[in-house]
Amino acid sequence: MPAPKVCIVTPAPPASRAGNRNTALRWARILRRLGCRVTIETRWSGRACDLFVALHARKSRPSLLDFRTRHPLCPAVLALTGTDLYRDIREDEDAARTLDLADRLVVLQEEALDELTPVQRRKAHVIHQSVETTLRHAPPARPFRICVLGHLREEKDPFRIVAALRQMPGEALDVVQAGAALSASMARAAKRHMREDPRYRWLGDLPHWQAMRLLSRSHAMVISSLMEGGAHVVSEAIALGVPVIASDIPGNRGLLSKDYPALFPAGDEAALAALIRRAMNDPAYLRTLGSAVRRKGNLTDRLAEEHAWRKMLGELGLTPASARKRSAAT
């Protein structure tokens, strides 16, 4: 039996460092290790395949609809993003109906299941995002460094950290933000904030290895997003053992847990500032955050993500070549 052909469709173009592109690349590596032949496209070209995987219900709907129309019996998987789960399927009927076109749904954290209907939940798989790194958490002795990683767009609430800094006049800390500005107004705002407060630095878009090094050399990471499907940067912080201060939204709770001791109400800079101040001034609290993050380390295991994909392929009747070889050997 030939190796299964898999087509992954992501709206993020090849040169993009967007989360959807990174997810597509990581899944392609996993599927290839499982013995599949994989191509990645931004819109389905009509290429024949044994499995169709689409990322983003709204943006990939035309491709998924086209594939389902032309190949009604071939399996299709739809991966749901934060904007899918927490905005689009609530407001856009076409986006909501896209979920019915897929044989399986993929979400990136447990709380995402709460957004699905009972029928949709039965075909959903939670696949946590793995992280492979040799870096270790090694922040400088001083000053206390906070990093904020992610592209500058409204859903990320990227300048909540700047508003929190205004609540902390005179506090000695270093805030480093990295990520591309997805609009000219965001770039102008970041530059203005740097002029107004020398404690804040925006580095723009960084190669992944540089962003990971920045994360590893920070005392803590802040993620202030208004919506997330399950941010890979949180998984990266977990893998490194970097304490996270996170907005209290489903996408963050689903990775860190509901009782994680550094959640703040989304959009509340005073609460964010209070948590930063406590992390700076209370070493025991900072150690507690680090321990809580490290206890989630199993979520970022590569073999666990690979196993989840192998299980789903089996459900869809696609036996990976690696599994066939093991079966033959026994």
Image: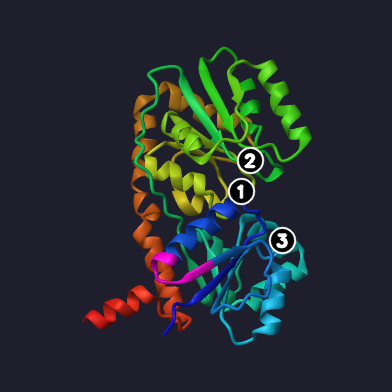
Residue 246 image point, x, y percent: 53, 40
Are discs 2 and 3 less than 8 Å apart at CB?
Answer: no
Question: Is residue 203 among the parts visible in the rendering?
Answer: yes
Magenta range is: 32-38
Horizontally, is 274 left or right of 300 in the view?
A: right
Corner quadrant of residue 102: bottom right
Which residue: 45% across, 29% down? 218
Circle 2 Cα neighbour tier, 10 Å, few/some/many (<14 / 14–19 / ≥20): many
Residue 261 image point, x, y percent: 44, 40
Circle 2 sits in a helix, a strand or a loop, which is it?
loop
Circle 3 sits in a helix, a strand or a loop, which is it?
helix
Residue 54 image point, x, y percent: 61, 67
Question: For the residues carrying marks 2 and 3, which lies nearer the camera in this image?
Answer: 2
Question: For the residues carrying marks 3 and 1, which lies nearer the camera in this image?
Answer: 1
What is the three-letter code of the residue carrying label 3? Asp
Would residue 37 be counted in the magenta stretch? yes
Are discs 1 and 2 less than 8 Å apart at CB?
Answer: yes
Identify the residue under disc 3. 88
Identify the residue under disc 2. 151
Quarter placement of the N terminus: bottom left
Relative to 259, say whether 144 is above or below. above
